[in-house]
Image (tube, rainbow, N blue to C red):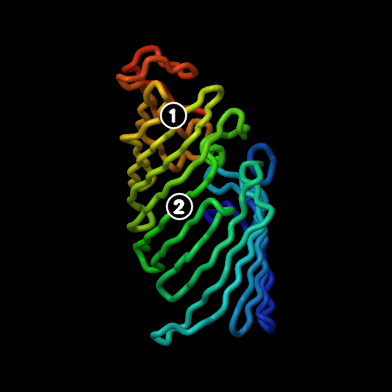
């Protein structure tokens, strides 16, 4: 693992039981451990059970603490190939020191394709799709949000938790991606109603995005009040999600119909300002 982690484990080949412990190769400059992953696997003739515990591991820009259970059962496809299907669940999940919704889903695994039939984050978010296991790993992935909360998304763009008094609203929409896993392309559309940002209330928000690789471009998007709309535009580097400045290239500006927009630092109707939480 690029000389950053060391792996220790035990194998009981007689009973097909295995355990792994993955720890930092060296501590961080502060002396704190970067995290620890413990995995226990039990393989039987027709099925398997894998239990993992991720203890404050950096995943991208996110500190992750969770327990994962993966089950699988062998079945024969219509072409007589051997494949597996099973479930994936998490428990006690904390991301960036904030409790997070649990994951619960179903999958199928064949020699050349991993299919996520449904992975839910609580009842509000669903992820599904297919990933080829053959280079360049072409994929089709769909993310759906329904009756979700705007405040749920703050964990991805802020290093601190915000209360619903500061940010609230209902959210729905979808993001669809396709192409080689390292350079996927797609589009997203999100709608929100009854949005509150601080003391300011917004009737609605419509956000449209184009995604190419790790860059998400926002255009033709608006956050509206009764007086008019704010135009939202710019780009977000998805690799920066989880950092305080993740939205620094996303700008808001007033349109010609907006007269008074208290709560925003807009001095002129054609002036743009950075978007931050």
Frontmost residue, 258 versus 29: 258
The residue at the point 45 percent across, 68 percent down is 114
Image height check: is 176 above or below 266? Answer: below
Frontmost residue, 50 versus 188: 188
The residue at the point 42 percent across, 34 percent down is 205
Which corner quadrant of the image does residue 253 belong to?
top left
Q: Where residue 204 sits in the image (x, y, percent)?
A: 43, 33
**Left or right of 142 on screen, residue 69:** right
In this view, the residue farthest toward the front is: 226
Q: Where residue 73 sits in the image (x, y, percent)?
A: 57, 78
Image height check: is 121 above or below 51? Answer: above
**Left or right of 3 on screen, residue 142:** left
Disc on the earlier residue, 2 or 1: 2
Foreground tag (2 vs 1): 2
Instruction: Name the element at disc 2.
Output: strand
Q: Where residue 7 sits in the image (x, y, percent)?
A: 63, 61
Image height check: is 49 above or below 198? Answer: below
Near mark 1 (Cα within 10 A), the count class, few <14, some 14-19 or many ≥20, is: some
Frontmost residue, 273 versus 205: 205
The residue at the point 49 percent across, 18 percent down is 263
Residue behind mark 2: 144
Determine the CA span between mark 2 and mark 1.
25 Å
The residue at the point 62 percent across, 54 percent down is 102
Which corner quadrant of the image does residue 236 belong to?
top left
Q: Tell me if I can see residue 269 in this picture.
A: yes
Q: Where residue 125 sits in the image (x, y, percent)?
A: 52, 52
Q: Where, quadrant-wise, is the N terminus in this rendering?
A: bottom right
Instruction: Name the element at disc 1.
Output: loop
Q: Which mark is residue 248?
A: 1
Q: Tell me if I can see residue 242 in this picture.
A: no
Q: Which mark is residue 211?
A: none
């Amino acid at each position: 693992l690029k000389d950053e982690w060391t792996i220790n484990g035990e194998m009981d080949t007689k009973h097909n039981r295995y355990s792994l412990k993955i720890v930092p190769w060296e501590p961080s400059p502060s002396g704190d451990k970067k995290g620890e992953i413990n995995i226990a696997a039990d393989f039987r003739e027709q099925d398997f059970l894998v239990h993992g515990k991720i203890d404050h591991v950096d995943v991208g820009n996110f500190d992750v603490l969770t327990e994962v259970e993966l089950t699988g059962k062998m079945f024969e496809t219509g072409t007589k190939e051997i494949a597996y299907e099973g479930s994936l669940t998490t428990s006690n999940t904390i991301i960036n020191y904030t409790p997070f919704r649990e994951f619960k889903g179903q999958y199928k695994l064949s020699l050349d394709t991993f299919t996520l039939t449904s992975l839910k984050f609580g009842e509000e978010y669903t992820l599904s799709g297919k990933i080829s296991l053959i280079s360049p790993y072409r994929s089709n992935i769909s993310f759906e949000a329904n009756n979700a909360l705007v405040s749920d998304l703050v964990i991805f763009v802020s290093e601190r938790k915000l209360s619903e008094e500061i940010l609230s609203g209902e959210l729905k929409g979808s993001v669809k991606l396709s192409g080689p896993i390292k350079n996927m392309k797609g589009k997203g559309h999100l709608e929100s109603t009854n949005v509150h940002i601080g003391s300011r209330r917004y009737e609605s928000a419509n956000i449209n995005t184009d995604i190419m690789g790790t860059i998400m471009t926002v255009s033709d998007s608006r956050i509206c009040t009764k007086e008019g709309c704010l135009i939202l535009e710019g780009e977000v580097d998805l690799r920066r999600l989880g950092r305080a400045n993740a939205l620094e290239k996303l700008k808001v500006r007033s349109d010609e119909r907006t007269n008074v927009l208290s709560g925003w630092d807009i001095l002129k109707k054609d002036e743009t300002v950075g978007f931050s939480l």
